Image (cartoon, rainbow, N blue to C red):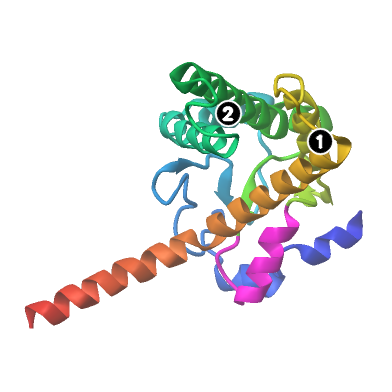
Amino acid sequence: MDDLTEIAPSAAECASANIPGTDIRPAGNSPKRLFNIIPNNRADEFQKEYKPLTTREKFNIARSDSFDWPNYFLLAGYAVQSQVLSGGFQHNGGMSGFAKFYGRSLGDQIIGSYITEAILPSVFHEDPRFFRIGTGSVWHRVSYASSRVLVTRADDGRYRFNFSEIAGNASIVALTRLYYPNSGSLGDATERFGMQLGNDVISNLVTEFWPDIKRRLRFHGLLQSFQKNR
C-alpha cells in the first residue's frame, strides 16, 4: 500500500529535526509513562533510519505494558468504576464482587497488550510501536497520531495497513466475551470494538503531545516562581 506513505511525516518536517547519524528525536525522548504514571512502552521517537524490533523485543514491550506496577492501581480504579456502573458495590457482591471485576480488568489488560503488541505483530511482521514525530503543525500531528490505528510499519520498514491493531482489537472483544457475563449482542461487541480503537487513538494523541504539554507546564511553573521571587 504505497499510498499510505502520504500519511507519514513529511521529509521537510523530519529534516527540520535531523540529528546526523542518529535517530530523529525532535523533542526529547519519547514518554514511556503518560502523565509520568501510565506505562507506555510502545512509544518511540520517529527514526531517521528505521530499526525493526525482534520478536523478543515485541514480547518485552507487551510484558512491560501488562505488568508494570502502576497498572495494578489503575485497574483497581477501572474495576470499581465497572462495579458501580453495573449496579453498585453492594449489589455486585462487595469485595468478592470487586475481585471478579478486578480479574476481568487484569485479563483485558494482559490479553490486549500481548495480542496487539506481541503476538499479531510477530505473526504479521508489523511494528507495534507508535513513533512520535514531535514537529510540524498541530493538525498534521493530530492527523498523523490518529491515523496510526490504521497505518503501521512492517518489519521491512514499509508502511502498510495495521492488521495487528484492527484484527487484534476484534480478537480482544471476542475473547473477553468468554469471561464477561451477559456480554451482550453483536451491536454491543461492535461498540466495544469502536471504544478500543478510540482509546488507542487517544493514547497516540497523548503520547504525541504530552512532552509539549509537560514542557509548557514546567515553563509556566518556573515563570510563576520567578514572578513570586521578584
Is 121 situated above or below 130? above
**Residue drawn at point x = 61 percent, y = 55 percent:** 202
The answer for how far apart the CA atoms under marks 2 and 1 are is 17 Å
Residue 17 image point, x, y percent: 55, 68
Could you tell whether 225 is left or right of 47 in the image?
A: left
* Left or right: 112, with 43 as reference point: right
Residue 87 badge: none
User: Residue 212, located in which quarter of the rendered image?
Assistant: bottom left
Residue at mark 1: 170
Give the residue type that dot 1 points to. Ala
Amino acid type, mark 2:
Ser
Q: Extreme top residue here?
A: 96
Q: Residue at x 92, y 54 (%)?
A: 1
- Residue under label 2: 105
Circle 2/circle 1 CB separation < 8 Å:
no
Which quadrant holds residue 147?
bottom right
Secondary element under disc 1, as helix, strand or loop, is helix
- Magenta range: 133-148
Residue 9 shows up from this direction: no
Q: Is residue 28 left or right of residue 65?
A: left
Rate crowding at label 2 as few (under 14), some (14 to 19) or many (20 or more) other CA atoms within 10 Å: many
| Whole-percent x, y for residue 132 in the image | 59, 57
Q: Does residue 157 appear left or right of residue 100 in this picture?
A: right
Give coordinates of residue 218: x percent, y percent: 30, 66
